[in-house]
Image (cartoon, grey):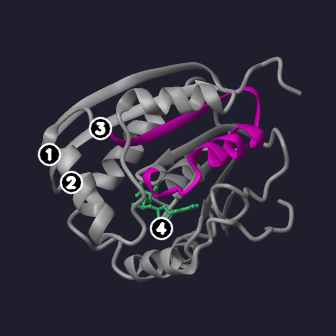
């Protein structure tokens, strides 16, 4: 890991919002839903082996990273998050058995403190809609992937239901850290714009009354850093 430079997205108000949320993030009814979506997203990683290196961008309190850490016995699971308190909660959960292969770092999605080509997979769940500069963030995620490696992004799709469309409008007003949810094709367009290839949408589904969530319009996008990239 390199020194963490300051991120343009480390907006103080945003950070405070997520720091507050971190205090009871794992206790909230919705946490079951977040865990479900993280499991689904990990399930979309193609060719994950015990030696893979994975980065979770916007990792929250670290559920996915710790889960990955337990299977990546010869690899590495890293999480980064803008919130100091989310990272503190995640760090507190690293057991002695995982300490050599799990790492959490406070940083913004648009300024990732890892070298080029470091990871075999980058994942991002329930977090992309918080990013003020999504293309810059995607370009950073691509940079830290090795050429040919896979990104998997999960978020809510506004084109799948009126409910999610309305929810997005409400969150834009009431939730500090919310930038916007996207229409499902928009994520594919952004992946292309950021220089990924093989963009595809393996999961697009409305979910009702699942894992503590009333309703959600779930999308999971996959893409690859071009193998020809240097
Ligand atoms: C709803 S939580 C999702 C956490 C976890 N990925 C999950 O699925 O449960 C969103 C997370 O994104 C983080 N976040 C928001 N903006 C960010 C940014 N620009 N860079 C990195 N993390 C960010 C927040 O601090 C928060 O922990």
Residue 171 in picture, x, y percent from top left = 28, 62
Query: Alpha-carbon neighbours of circle 3 within 10 Å: few (<14), some, or many (≥20)?
Result: many
Q: Disc 4 or 3, which lies upstream in sequence?
A: 4
- Of circles 4 and 2, which is in front? 2
18 lies above or below 111:
below
The reply to whether dot 3 and dot 1 touch (C-beta < 8 Å) is no
Q: Which residues are magenta?
A: 129-157
Whether residue 176 is visible: yes
The reply to whether dot 1 and dot 2 touch (C-beta < 8 Å) is yes
Q: Which residue is mark 2?
A: 167
| Residue 61 badge | 4
Label 4 beta carbon less than 8 Å to ligand 1? yes
2 lies above or below 205:
below
* Between 145 and 103, the one nearer to me in the picture: 145
Q: Which residue is mark 1?
A: 163
Residue 155 in picture, x, y percent from top left = 38, 43
Query: Alpha-carbon neighbours of circle 2 within 10 Å: few (<14), some, or many (≥20)?
Result: some
Image mark count: 4
User: Mark 3 to mark 1: distance in Å?
Assistant: 12 Å
User: Mark 4 to mark 3: distance in Å?
Assistant: 21 Å
Inspect the magenta stretch and tell me whether residue 91 lies in it: no
Q: Which residue is mark 3?
A: 218
- Of circles 4 and 3, which is in front? 3
Residue 110 in picture, x, y percent from top left = 67, 55
- Of circles 4 and 1, which is in front? 1
* Between 172 and 115, the one nearer to me in the picture: 172
């Amino acid at each position: 890991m390199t020194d963490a430079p300051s991120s343009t997205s480390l907006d103080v108000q945003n950070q405070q919002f997520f720091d507050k949320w971190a205090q009871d993030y794992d206790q909230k009814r919705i946490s079951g839903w977040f865990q479900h979506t993280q499991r689904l997203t990990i399930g979309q990683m193609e060719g994950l082996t015990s030696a893979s290196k994975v980065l979770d961008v916007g990792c929250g309190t670290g559920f996915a990273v710790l889960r990955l850490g337990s299977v990546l016995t010869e690899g590495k699971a890293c999480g980064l998050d803008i919130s100091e308190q989310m990272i503190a909660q995640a760090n507190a959960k690293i057991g002695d058995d995982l300490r050599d292969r799990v790492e959490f770092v406070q940083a913004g999605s648009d300024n990732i403190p890892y070298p080029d080509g470091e990871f075999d997979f980058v994942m991002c769940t329930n977090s992309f809609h918080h990013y003020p500069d999504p293309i810059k963030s995607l370009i950073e995620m691509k940079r830290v992937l090795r050429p040919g490696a896979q990104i998997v992004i999960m978020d809510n799709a506004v084109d799948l239901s009126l409910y999610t469309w309305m929810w997005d409008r409400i969150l834009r007003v009431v939730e500090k850290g919310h930038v916007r949810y996207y229409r499902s094709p928009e994520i594919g367009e952004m992946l292309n714009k950021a220089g990924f290839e093989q963009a595809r949408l393996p999961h697009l589904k409305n979910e009702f009354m699942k894992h503590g969530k009333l309703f959600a319009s779930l999308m999971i996008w996959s893409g690859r850093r071009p193998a020809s990239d240097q």
